[in-house]
Image: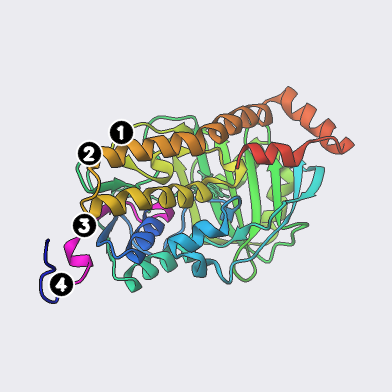
Amino acid sequence: MARWPEGASVTALKNEVHIAGGGLAGLSLAAGLRRREVPVVVHEAGHYPRHRVCGEFISGVDEAVLDELGVAACLDDARRPRSLSWYRRDRLVMRDELPVAAWAISRHCLDQRLAREVVRLGGRVVEGSRRPREAREGLVWAAGRQPRRGRWIGLKAHFRGLEMDSGLEMHLGRSGYVGLCRVEGDRVNACGLFTLDRRIRGGGMMMNYLRREGLDGLARRLESVGMDGGSFSAVAGFRLGWQGGGGCGVGDAVGMIPPFTGNGMSMAFESARDALDPLDAWSRGAASWEGVLAELRRRSRRRFARRLSAAAVMQGVMLNRAGQALLERLGRAGWLPFRPMLSLVR
Ligand SMILES: Cc1cc2nc3c(=O)[nH]c(=O)nc-3n(C[C@H](O)[C@H](O)[C@H](O)COP(=O)(O)OP(=O)(O)OC[C@H]3O[C@@H](n4cnc5c(N)ncnc54)[C@H](O)[C@@H]3O)c2cc1C
């Protein structure tokens, strides 16, 4: 029978897991692994805290998932919005409530909290460490979307003191949309997905995109309060849906759901949770790396295939003129099957 070396901790006897990418998926995976005493190093290309393009509205994740990852406390004081309203080009289409309250918290705050939690649990977080993409044993790819040419641009900024008529306001424009939700204090996050127009650039980018979308009323509302210029962020060069790329991946690196669902961060948490058992087993020497890859692929297909397909179809309808007109008519008549539609993307 193998003897434990004198004074060795459980951690010292396990294989170390390296995670490239310290966003929600990478950090929550690291926290969950540390709770199982798996040695973990997270390599993050950037530095905390930092603003990221994100609606900052977390909907659809089960609290048991957050508990298992050990990150529930990071959301303790987050706002819990439940009501929502949908507008089409500044006209109210419908109001409703989510079956379960969401969480609203800035990524500026949340990612830093998660990174601190990983360190508190005994993990290492190396900031300013950009890793090359490689498929090597022990390396988990959590670096977010695959950079590639794409038709989208995501923009986000915080605005102070904006009045809102519900916990989440969704505004549909001609070919894009914007979500508003209140995060810390009097900050409201405005985040949109638009079709990229390379002629729109520079300081007034967000307002120019809103006006191109026919969202003049929303642009005026946002202009009437102050934008926190330091929170403005933009991202382009990505595609939604399965990302491909092989290797061991979690979060957006595996699949990116259209943002209107408010479910991308939940998917990041869920995929991190799904990776815990296989990586823990590999770390103990009880599973091969090939076995880990096969199991993660199987789990992500089973968990995410339906919602990625349904969300792609729904977004296509939402961003098409005839589809929008139909949604508006159904919404105003109170016939839009909002909850069944929501359950397809959860
Ligand atoms: C416009 C828009 C709005 C959105 N709104 C919402 C919303 O309201 N609700 C929601 O749930 N989801 C939303 N999402 C999706 C959500 O932001 C993502 O699903 C979520 O951030 C995925 O987390 P992640 O950890 O996989 O990736 P990320 O959060 O992107 O983290 C990846 C990390 O990896 C780092 N990195 C990148 N390359 C390397 C490298 N080579 N080496 C080391 N580190 C690297 C990056 O710096 C980053 O910190 C939105 C997305 C967009 C584009």
Q: Assess mark 1: CB under 8 A from ligand 1?
A: no
Provide the residue designation for mark 2.
135
The magenta span reads 8-25
Secondary element under disc 3, as helix, strand or loop, is loop
Provide the residue designation for mark 1.
246
Q: Residue furthest right?
A: 333
Which is nearer the N-term, disc 3 or disc 2?
3
Name the amino acid type tagged 3. Glu
Provide the residue designation for mark 3.
16
> Tag on residue 8?
4
- The residue at 46%/58% (across/down) is 51
Query: Do residues under tags 2 and 1 come within 8 Å of each other at their CB atoms?
Result: yes
Q: Residue furthest bottom?
A: 7
Tell me how far mark 2 sits from mark 4, CA to CA.
Answer: 30 Å
Horizontally, is 138 left or right of 337 in the view? left
Within 10 angstroms of label 2, few (less than 14), some, or many (20 or more) residues?
some
